[in-house]
Image (tube, grey):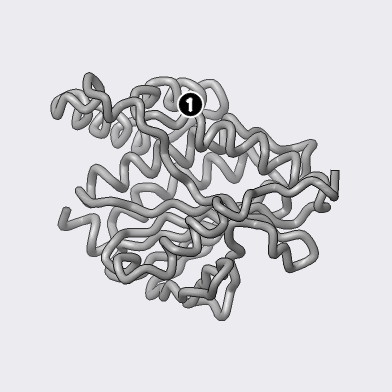
Amino acid sequence: MSEVPIFTDAEREAISGLVLSPQFEKYGKFMLNVRDFSASNFKADQLASAYLLMNSILMTRASQKILKFVCLSGGSRDDLTSGVNILRSYLRGDFSSLGNIRTWESVLRNSADLPADILIEVERTIEFFEGSEIGDSSRSFQRAEVAIGFAANGETPEAEFIMQEDNVFLRRLNVQSGSKPVAMTEIFYGKHNVYRLGDRGKNTCIDLSLSDWQESLIEWMTNVKTILSGEFYSKA
């Protein structure tokens, strides 16, 4: 398995061009750093549903394009390879289409006892898409275009990107042709996860632990309201 390339040169070049482009700064970023990865506790459908649903909520509140990054770390290369391949089938396949927003909600409802706040936000988001007729247009079939990275033993140059922590307030996206910093200004800690906001809340970074997935998922969903209270989203 270790001899098989995970991403093509074209895929890595495309992400590199996006991150290093002049347009990068004007878009929002939703970065998810998945720590403590192991194949035995990886629920790709639940993780993808939570990520895609939250991205939709952020996009609705911000009314702008959001660049999406998910990075897996903490496992062996072979485990991470398997996880990446499974995850991108969810994040880049038909499952990621906006037309499946009810499916994402259903997956999460069946996965954990979600707080009322997130369910209210979900309904608002669905009402927005239905009211704007996005769900009935060809856009509903567009895929999410999520960049996927992974890091085994700290370095994996074959990934589309690697998420580096320079310090608690600075994340760096290392890509094929360079790197780009993403500054954070607000940080709050949960029992399992760490949540960061930057650029008045326009940028969101979550360090998500898989060591106790159900608790991490519930904690994440519980903190969506706190993330949305950032200056950028609260005024959107």
- Depth order, front residue of 61/158: 158
Q: How crowded is mark 1: few (under 14 residues within 10 Å), some or many (20 or more)?
A: many
Residue shown at 45% from the left, 27% from the top: 104
Is residue 207 visible in the rendered structure shown here? Answer: yes
Q: In the structure shown, which secondary structural element does the residue marked by tag 1 occupy?
A: helix
Q: In this view, does 78 lie above or below 130?
A: below
Q: How many marks?
A: 1
Residue 102 as seen in the image, left or right of residue 85: left
Residue shown at 48% from the left, 26% from the top: 95
Indicate the position of residue 40 as horizontal and vertical percent values.
79, 36
Residue that extends furthest to the front in the rendered view of this protein? 10
Indicate the position of residue 182 as horizontal and vertical percent values.
43, 72
- Depth order, front residue of 25/219: 25
Indicate the position of residue 206 as horizontal and vertical percent values.
50, 57
Residue 96 as seen in the image, left or right of residue 80: left
Q: Is residue 150 above or below residue 6?
A: below
Residue 215's image quarter? top right
Residue shown at 65% from the left, 57% from the top: 159
User: What residue sits right under mark 1 in the picture?
Assistant: 95
Is residue 192 visible in the rendered structure shown here? Answer: no
On-image quarter of the N terminus: top right
Q: Is residue 122 above or below residue 205?
A: above
The amino acid type, in three-letter code, at marker 1 is Phe
Indicate the position of residue 62 as horizontal and vertical percent values.
23, 51
Residue shown at 80% from the left, 65% from the top: 153
